[in-house]
Image: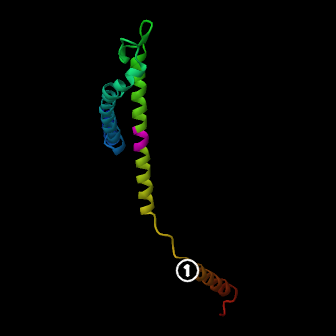
Amino acid sequence: MAKINRRARSLINDFREFALKGNVVDLAIAFIIGGAFGKIVTSFVEDVIMPLINPLVALPGQDWRTISIGPGIALGRFFGSIVDFLIIAFVLFVTIQALQKFKRQEQIATQAPPPDPNVAAQERLTEALNHLTQTLATRNPQL
């Protein structure tokens, strides 16, 4: 019974550590914001974009949302979903590009400046002299 309690506690502790890691919390927040963003994009497409496109794609007397081929094949809703996807993909592309640019700038700022070539040459010469001194001392112990 003690082993089961110990295992259950370690499982709960492991899950707590996993769930409270930044990546999981960030993913949950991104999922919630993504859902809200999807609704905004859908509204933008249905209420702003498609009324502008509707005169170009609509059949006489039909709204773009009701365009269909045969029973049950709703092309209008499908076209709206395609436009939703393209807008979301474009926004994600722009966002990822901006984040990558920010990370590159951050990496450049955190990189150490290159060492002075004169200092590096002096260090190499000092190491060579120390090595030479040790070699001479082992060959001729009287020095």
Residue 120 relative to residue 64: left or right: right
Q: Is residue 133 above or below residue 11?
A: below
Residue 137 relative to residue 32: left or right: right
Residue lying at the far bottom of the rendered structure: 143
Where is residue 12 drawn, in percent x and y?
Answer: 31, 37
Q: Specify few, some or many for label 1: CA neighbours under 10 Å numbering under 14, 14-19, or 20 or more.
A: few
Q: Quadrant of residue 58?
A: top left
Please provide the residue range marked out in magenta. Answer: 91-95
**Type of secondary structure dominating the magenta stretch:** helix
Residue at image position (39%, 28%) is 84
Residue 90 is a magenta residue: no
Which residue is identified by label 1? 118
Residue lying at the far top of the rendered structure: 71
The amino acid pointed to by label 1 is Asn
Residue 8 relative to residue 71: left or right: left
Given residues 75 and 21, the one toward you in this image is 75
Given residues 113 and 53, the one toward you in this image is 53
Describe the element under mark 1 as helix, strand or loop. Answer: helix
Q: Is residue 97 above or below residue 88?
A: below
Q: Is residue 120 above or below residue 93?
A: below
Q: Quadrant of residue 131?
A: bottom right
Given residues 90 and 11, the one toward you in this image is 90
